[in-house]
Image (tube, rainbow, N blue to C red):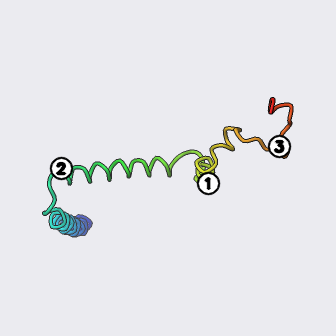
């Protein structure tokens, strides 16, 4: 029964911290309109989902950054030859 009393203390501490957090949010949002609170919540939630999806993918973060920064190289749209062939350029 001693274990349950120790858990009860942690439960009370958690409830105190949750109440303190609730009061902090309420004091910071008391001058905001309801639509502003809803908008901030929506943007924060969508941002967190995007960050989670971006960070936790099968592909490594560095390879995804390279793909974002160098999309032309990935699509093979750049010509890497040194001198252009005059026959391919057409009349000029």
Q: Mark 2 points at which residue?
A: 35
Would you say 51 lies left or right of 31 here? right
Which residue is more in the foreground, 92 or 48?
92
Residue 1 appears in which quarter of the rendering?
bottom left
**Comparing marks 2 and 1, which lies closer to the viewer?**
2
Look at 42% across and 48% down and name the residue there.
Answer: 50
Q: Where is residue 36 in the image (x, y as percent from the top left)?
A: 20, 53
Please report the residue visible at 71 percent of the width from the left and 38 percent of the height from the top: 76
Residue at mark 3 to residue at mark 2: CA–CA distance:
56 Å
Query: Residue 7 or 60: which is nearer the viewer?
Result: 60
Q: Mark 3 points at which residue?
A: 81
Q: What element carries label 1?
A: helix
Label 2, secondary structure: give it: helix
**Which of the marked residues, 3 or 2, is nearer the chain's N terminus?**
2
Residue at 86% of width from left, 37% of height from top? 85
Dot label at residue 62: 1
* Cβ atoms under marks 2 and 1 closer than 8 Å: no
Image coords of residue 14 (percent x, y): 23, 66
Separation of residues labelled 2 and 1 (CA atoms)? 38 Å
Callout 3 environment at 10 Å: few (<14), some (14 to 19), or many (20+)? few
Q: Residues within 10 Å of mark 1 (few under 14, many from 20)?
A: few
């Amino acid at each position: 029964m001693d274990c349950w009393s120790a858990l009860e203390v942690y439960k009370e501490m958690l409830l105190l911290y949750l109440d303190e957090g609730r009061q902090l949010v309420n004091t910071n949002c008391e001058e905001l309109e309801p639509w502003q609170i809803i908008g901030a919540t929506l943007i924060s939630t969508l941002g967190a989902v995007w960050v989670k999806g971006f960070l936790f993918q099968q592909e490594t973060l560095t390879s995804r950054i390279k793909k974002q920064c160098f999309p032309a190289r990935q699509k093979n749209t750049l010509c890497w030859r040194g001198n252009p062939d005059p026959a391919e350029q057409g009349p000029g």
